[in-house]
Image (cartoon, helix red, strand yellow):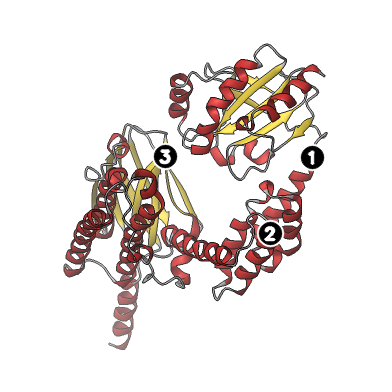
Amino acid sequence: MKNLLILALFAGIIACNPKPIAKINGSIQNKEVDEIIVSNQLLKSNDTLKIADSSFSATLKVDQPGIYDFRNGKYGFQVYLKPGIEIKIDLDIANLKEGDYSKIAISGKGTDETKLMLKVSALNASVMSELRNMLALPPDSFETSINNYKQELTTTIDSFKAAGNAGKHFLDRINTIASIQISEKYMYYIMYHPRFAPNDTTSIPSAFFEAGNDIALDNEQFFNEMNTYKYFVLQKHDSQIAEMLKKEGIEQNSVDEASRHIDIIANLDVTQSVKDELGNQLISGYTYATDEVKDVYQKRYTEIIKNQEYISEFKSTLQKLEALQPGNTAPTFAYEDMNGNTVTSEQLKGKVIYIDVWATWCGPCMREIPYLKQLDSELHNMDIAFVSISIDGDKDAWKKMVENKELQGYQLYAEGEWQSDIIKDYAIKGIPRFILIDKDGKLVNANANRPSSGEILKKQLMELAKS
């Protein structure tokens, strides 16, 4: 009898602790690529599901419950995975392109949380589709719209909670995501209402600026597993730091500002992981800083960054930048043009090469295009190769932009987006980035003047072309 009791107890323990795996299968129509990525980078989880005849199936290792990205190409949504789940997903990417989450079919064991997440995503997508118009509304009308959204969101989550379909782990996270999504709408209003409604003299209510203040910024577990929360926390700290620097009247982009910024981060009452991220964000602008500010970053970055991966990355960036000094041989490139023909830097030797690293989604990149076209037109007969290298994730969007805007020069496409060779070779942290190379393939400037600089750049290009 005693042995039977022990066996029964052991069986009960096994039943209450499912294997750390999640079974996932389904079908996909109008796929972007032949694979699906299921990932949570913060949890160091990244799985690739191969698509065969529009179907996919896999068993994934899931050590702990969490919110994961489910993506095909650039389109996707979030799912809630946990040990023991068996989830079937049937979708059409054409619907996701339209922002329609309602047609994604979810079934299987333990999928109630994912179904709710899709409802929350659908509500958010609905508001985002109208956000441009909402941001032009007077403050009271905008708040009415947001309150309607908030009420529907709250009702949806409360109904799910009342049904007893999930535990505290999931509810804590979905409630936090909902609160962040609401607060973000107020942030957008503060940022863009003056632009979209320039004649509105109504003061923005102080309550708009306080939206999201009730969301705790010190949940380390959330910070280390949820991108939505992580970026919200960093944005809040960034805003607070910027406000402090502004109140202290410190000159922007100065040595004093750089030093004070580091001091503030070092003294924040936050976990080291938050300091690591804020510090890493700060030094990401290293390539655009003055030499004096660069010196501050080099001397003091280890005061705020302890993450060895970030430290190694910065050291690697410094080494790359050293190799990108004027007069050094420029890194080579080889990319396909609109017709699928490969264009290389070696083929362009004997000409001055002016490179524009850009993407269709980049606003500042778009603003440089008219100036670049004018420059190309004025210097068309000189020994200058104007090379535009796109890091778009959507190749079709790049092609359409090139055709619709009748872009000139060499229009090339770099696979891999931020992991492409041009990004790595030139330690690029932000775009647009312009690069100037002389006729011998030597670097003139790895962070050259933009086309909008006008005569300064034009004169430099002409002098190099005549040399």
Kind of residue sitting beneath label 3: Lys
| Residue 57 coordinates in the image, percent (x, y) | 35, 44
Drawn side of residue 345 relative to residue 66, left or right = right
Q: Which mark is residue 311?
A: 2
- Nearer to us in this view, 53 or 430: 430
Looking at the image, tell me whether mark 1 or mark 2 is earlier in sequence order: 2
Q: Secondary structure at mark 3?
A: loop
- Nearer to us in this view, 133 or 331: 133
Other residues around mark 1 within 10 Å, as few (<14) / some (14–19) / many (≥20): some
Q: Look at the image and tell me in which quarter the C terminus lies.
A: top right
Question: Which of the 4 quarters of the picture holds residue 273?
Answer: bottom right
Q: Which residue is mark 3?
A: 74
Question: Which of the 4 quarters of the picture holds residue 217?
Answer: bottom left
Drawn side of residue 274 relative to residue 206, left or right = right
Kind of residue sitting beneath label 1: Gln
Q: Which residue is mark 1?
A: 325
- Nearer to us in this view, 350 or 59: 350
Q: Look at the image and tell me in which quarter the N terminus lies.
A: bottom left
Q: Select label 1 or label 2 by which is in front.
A: 1
Kind of residue sitting beneath label 2: Ile
3 and 1 marks in contact (CB < 8 Å): no
Residue in the picture at 72% in, 55% down: 293
* Distance CA(mark 1)–CA(mark 2): 22 Å
Residue in the picture at 64% in, 58% down: 251
Q: Select label 3 or label 1 by which is in front.
A: 1
Residue in the picture at 52% in, 16% down: 339
